[in-house]
Image (cartoon, rainbow, N blue to C red):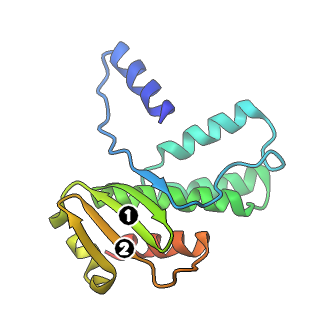
């Protein structure tokens, strides 16, 4: 978020067009970060976080995964989780979803417009409860799903379309 705000301020100062980012809040309780034992240099770590934050397609995410493996070796679980959250963010932006938050066995989704997300849940209608015009509750298929399995389930649901 800070990186995007900084980018906007710099672009405005240079009189450059400001990209319209649809920020998505994601909290699936997944441990997703760049561990010190994988990337110890703080300056480089900030640069990589910045790059990951700017990724906007599945192809770019795959390229980043290759770059990380080439530069720093085998990718640890926490970094894979970070890239999975990035995939979820990209898919959620394309689907006009503003927020995904896991609470117990439910994912609470804040959406821009119910009609725009209708097709995402055509195969999961029994799992989705419409709370109001901008909020959906998605019941997870297993209440005791791991955080990784939850994120993978959400990713596959969003990318299916």
Of marks 1 and 2, which one's residue comes earlier in the chain?
1
Q: Residues within 10 Å of mark 1 (few under 14, many from 20)?
A: many
Q: Position of residue 46 (x, y in %)?
A: 65, 35
Q: Residue sitting at 38 percent across and 26 percent down?
A: 8
Quadrant in which residue 128 is drawn? bottom left
Residue plotted at (48% across, 60% down): 87
In this rendering, position of residue 114 left or right of residue 127:
left
Q: Quadrant of the C terminus?
A: bottom left
Q: How many marks?
A: 2
SS at mark 2?
strand
Q: Quadrant of residue 77?
A: bottom right
Q: Is residue 96 left or right of residue 81?
A: left
Residue furthest out toward the top? 13
| Mark 1: secondary structure | strand
Classify mark 2: residues with Cα within 10 Å, few (<14), some (14-19) or many (20+). Answer: many
What is the number of the mark on residue 146? none
The answer to whether one can see residue 58 in this image is no
Q: Is residue 38 above or below residue 48?
A: below
Query: Do the CB atoms of the residues marked 1 and 2 lie less than 8 Å apart?
Result: yes
Q: Which residue is mark 1?
A: 108
Q: Residue at x 66, y 52 (%)?
A: 67
In the depicted structure, whether residue 147 falls above or below residue 14: below
Q: Is residue 48 above or below residue 91?
A: above
CA–CA distance in space, label 1 to label 2: 6 Å
**Residue 20: x %, y % from top left:** 29, 38
Label disc, if present, on residue 138 of the rendered structure: 2
Query: How far across and down, in percent of the image, does residue 26 sit?
Result: 46, 54
Tell whether 37 sits left or right of 25.
right
Q: Nearer the viewer, residue 23 or 61?
A: 23
Nearest the camera: 99 or 63? 99
């Amino acid at each position: 978020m800070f990186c995007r705000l900084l980018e906007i301020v710099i672009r405005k100062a240079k009189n450059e067009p400001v990209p319209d980012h649809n920020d998505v809040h994601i909290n699936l309780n997944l441990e997703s970060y760049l561990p010190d034992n994988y990337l110890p240099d703080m300056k480089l770590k900030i640069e990589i976080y910045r790059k990951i934050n700017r990724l906007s397609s599945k192809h770019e995410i795959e390229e980043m995964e290759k770059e990380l493996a080439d530069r720093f070796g085998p990718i640890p679980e926490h970094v894979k989780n970070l890239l999975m959250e990035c995939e979820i963010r990209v898919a959620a932006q394309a689907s006009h979803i503003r927020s995904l938050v896991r609470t117990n066995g439910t994912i609470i989704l804040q959406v821009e417009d119910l009609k725009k997300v209708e097709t995402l849940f055509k195969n999961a209608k029994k799992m989705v409860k419409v709370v109001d015009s901008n909020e959906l509750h998605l019941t997870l298929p297993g209440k005791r799903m791991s955080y990784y399995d939850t994120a993978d389930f959400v990713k596959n649901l969003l990318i299916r379309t």
